[in-house]
Amino acid sequence: MCAAAAVAMAALQWEMRLCFARFDGPVTPSGPADTEGGDVAAMLRGLVLATVVAAGAAWGAGATDEAREATVAKFPVRLGDQTVLYVRQGIRSFTAAERAEQLSSRLTQLANDRTITPFKVTVEETKVSSDLLVGNEVLVSVFDGDARDFAGMTRHEVAEEAARKIEAAVVRYRQERTPQALALDAAKAGAVVFVATLILLVFERLFRKGRNVILESASRELAKVESKMKYVVSAEQLRWPLLLLLRVVRFIVWIAVLYGALTIALSFFPHTRSIAHDIDTLVLAPLGQLGLGILTALPELLVVLVIAFVARWLIRGARYFFYQVQRKRITIQGFYPEWARPTQRLVTVLVLIIAVIMAYPYIPGAKSPAFQGIAIFLGLLGSLGATGVVANLINGLLITYMRSFKVGDLVKIGDVTGVVEESSLLVTRLRTAKNVSISVPNSLVLSGQVMNYSASGTPLLTTQVTIGYDTPWRQVYAMLLGAAAATDGILNDPQPFVRQTGLDDFYVRYELNFSVSDLARLPATVSALHERIQDEFNTHGVQIMSPHFVANPESPAVVPRERWHTTPAAPGDPQSPAVGT
């Protein structure tokens, strides 16, 4: 302020010197009148300049004081949940925050000392401070620096006002913690809990009645909409948004009532009043910010919701359409029913990708560096780790549209033979004759050879036996066909037949070809067929040349009928006719 005044005075002196210099100087050709007018104008300019500079200096000083008042930090002196004073100045090695903390602790200790009754604060003046005393103990000292923050008040007046505030705070602090006051607070809290419980009970009763009325009315209207939509969209699908809205309303009411009851009940007790205030600060402030953020982002969120809604109904429509194609209720020339499900999945993926691309710019925070960094990181992980997955997906689509096999077919993929249980976009699962599920990656399926035994509708299976050259092949044919005819699960149409697949050194290789009625029971059916073949050959005294024999034995290596149920085999009917007899 002094510097501004000095600048103003210097400017004024400069203008006055200029004026007197003109007045005392030589007369110009214009005459005395012109000289006098110029001098007066110079004096006026000097006065205006001095006034402007002085006003600017005063305004600057006021603005500086206001800025200083706004920037000076103040720290509260608290007693319980009360803020008694504020400390703005530090002394010596103690900061203002440390002074406020120490004063709060000392004041709480003295307030809890019930032997100090009545609690009286006196002011004692010294040369450098005004001391506030409780009895003979100094509570706090007020210095000239503390009084400087209170315009128009002396140090003694500031100390007296602080003493009165401390006394009033201690009286209230003690009164609130008496047994009578705490009992009254407990009664108030109980009343609040009772009222909140009553409100929730009444709300639940009214909510159920209102919910039933709303749903009944909505069901009638939704049934009309369903009939107009030709049952493409069911009433149940249109009903869930209404149910969701009702649940949200119920949840909000419960939370609001419980939150209000909790904060009000906690605010009655002096020990928990600060907790109630903190709950408000911790809950309402973030909720307010969240609500403000939602309102700000509401237009973009509406765009995202519209895109999600359209994508959802497109996916539902595609699912319904391809389901009808799979059930052969809708026929498309050149499009096979088994293509319906994978095509529907492909359409779903494409719709989701397009929806994400369209909605991404409207997602709140999508333009933030953190969001973009996460998106780039996820994209990098997907590109590095999904190479094999993408290859299997493409191969799975190719396998589906090549129609190499379908679920339920008996196939041989590489060295694995089994019934197709599942043909997904990634793997093909087979159930082998040993009832083992094997997953074959689609990349191996497409790169290898696939044999489909069910392509003609009924798979043809085989089993082999080796019989010596001394047994007529016609007898072997009859025994094998008889065993097949007596085995449950083997079809008569197409009829089983026998082929000779090899003439080896010591035996002839016979192959029995047959079909089964249930591929799911293939292991059990093949096992029963082998049992019948053994019984048939043993009955007719023909030995099966496996394992190999170096020379023919003196008697055929067969099991006579009387030994078929040797211990521990279960006894059976030894007179039951042999197969083929």
Image (cartoon, grey):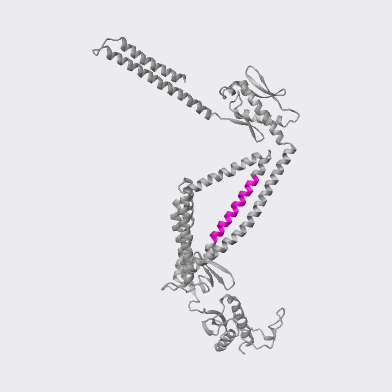
| Above or below: residue 497 compared with residue 304 | below
Q: Is residue 245 magenta?
A: yes
Question: Which residue is rendered at x = 67% and y = 49% of the image?
Answer: 195
Question: Which residue is rendered at x = 71% and y = 33% of the image?
Answer: 174
Coordinates of residue 435 in the picture (x, y in percent): 59, 71
Count of picture labels: 0
Coordinates of residue 350 in the picture (x, y in percent): 44, 61
| Above or below: residue 291 compared with residue 382 | above
> Which residue is at the far left?
29
> Which residue is at the far bottom?
581
Coordinates of residue 566 in the picture (x, y in percent): 71, 81
Q: In which quarter of the image is the C terminus?
A: bottom right
Coordinates of residue 7 in the picture (x, y in percent): 41, 19
The boundaries of the magenta stretch are 240-262
Main secondary structure of the magenta stretch:
helix
Question: Which residue is rendered at x = 52% and y = 30% of the image?
Answer: 70
Q: Closer to the camera, 171 or 382?
A: 171
Q: Does the magenta stretch include residue 98?
A: no
Image position of 103 (left or right of 303): right
